[in-house]
Amino acid sequence: MLRDLRATLSSLPPNTIRAGIVLLVLPMVGTAGYLIIEGWGFLDAVYMTVIVLTTIGLREVRPLDDSGRIFTIVLAIAGVGGIFYALISVFQFVLEGELGQLLGVQRMKGRIERLKDHYILCGFGRVGEEIAREFRDRDIQFVVVENNPEAIERARRRGHLVLIGDATSDAVLRESGVDSATCLLAASDSDAGNTFIVLTAKSLNPSLFLVSRAAHPESEARMVRAGADRVFSPYVIAGKQMALTALQPMVVEFIDTLAAQREGAPVLAEIDVAEASGLVARTIHEVLHDCRSVVVLGVQKPSGDLLVGAGSDTRLEAGDRVIVMGQEDELAAIHPAFSRGRVRRPR
């Protein structure tokens, strides 16, 4: 209890603390003054102090001598000034707190409304915090949707855009910009909650790419049926990663190097093959003949089939996704056709 009181006091502005001290000290000084100067009893001294400080205008408890009158004048002036100062401090604290919070929320909503092709992160637990850190390191625009006060405070301290509300609500998802978002990640601690988030988001934006967290393997099928494009179990992934590290450590290190995107290291990129990209009906050799250092790792067909290590004679179709690896400056300047396509880092 004492610790909670200390924490509360430390969070208050200095002016408010000083105002509280003034309101506490003035009655004590007034009571002590009448006890010492006039020699009154404790109740009479307290009563006289109260009527002087509150300026209610009642007559004196007993006749005052000159010393008592001078003390009363000083106490009355100090009391009026102290109470006025305390009222201003309290009013300033309330006004700045509520108004500042209101303006902060409005500014946050304005920034969220201006987002386009962004990512929506539902949940800011341990998994959500790691996702947000990765997005921030990659300069990805995203908004956190959360209704847990402690998680909201952590997200705000890290400077993330935060929308307070239940991610299973249609209204909250619309506020987060679900209609114009690129991807939504359901990363709450509840499998049932994540399933409902996916279901709600899919109904609002059928073309939205949905990634969901599943704590239990049996929840994965339900999330896929609800509309999730990818479902991940942190425990399964951790187990596979540890096993692969033990069996093939160099493979894991290679993948981690690409994922970390260290300075000078090659990066991965996805290219969506659309009708307007100029890539349709062309082979990989035709597209990449001027950029031999770029490696095609795979091509995902519209059916979902993934061609790993696709040959140079593979002909691209509308709806294909080409996964390439190379230096970032090379990927940006390879073939003019790529600049017309949609180039992004893999999700």
Image (cartoon, helix red, strand yellow):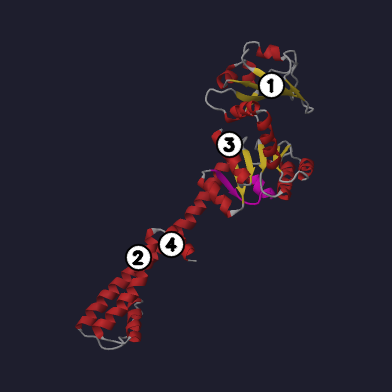
Mark 1 or mark 2, whichever is nearer to me: 1
Q: Name the front one of labels 2 and 4.
A: 4
Crowd rating for badge 2 (residues with CA inside 10 Å; few <14, some 14–19, many 20+) = some
Q: Which residue is mark 4?
A: 9
**How crowded is the residue under tag 1: few (<14 C-alpha within 10 Å), some, or many (20+)?**
some
Along the polypeptide, which appears first: circle 3 or circle 2? 2
Q: Nearer the viewer, residue 146 or 84?
A: 146
- Disc 4 residue crowd, few under 14, some 14–19, many 20+, Cα 10 Å: few
Horizontal side of 115 relative to 312 (left or right) equals left
Amino acid type at mark 4: Leu
Work out whether residue 295 or residue 252 is closer to the camera in this orientation and state it: 252
Q: Quadrant of the C terminus?
A: top right
Residue range of the region highlighted in magenta in the rendering: 160-174
1 and 2 marks in contact (CB < 8 Å)? no
Q: Is residue 179 visible?
A: no
Q: CA distance from mark 2 to mark 4?
A: 19 Å
What is the x, y in percent for residue 7? 46, 60
Q: CA distance from mark 3 to mark 1?
A: 23 Å
Question: Which residue lies under the disc numbered 2?
Answer: 85
Give the residue displayed 24% in from the left and 78% down from the top. Answer: 71
- Mark nearer the N terminus (3 vs 1): 3
Residue where numbered disc 3 is placed: 134
Return the x and y of residue 175 as percentages of the image width and height.
63, 46
**Amino acid carrying mark 3 in the image:** Glu
163 magenta-colored: yes
Q: CA distance from mark 3 to mark 2?
A: 48 Å
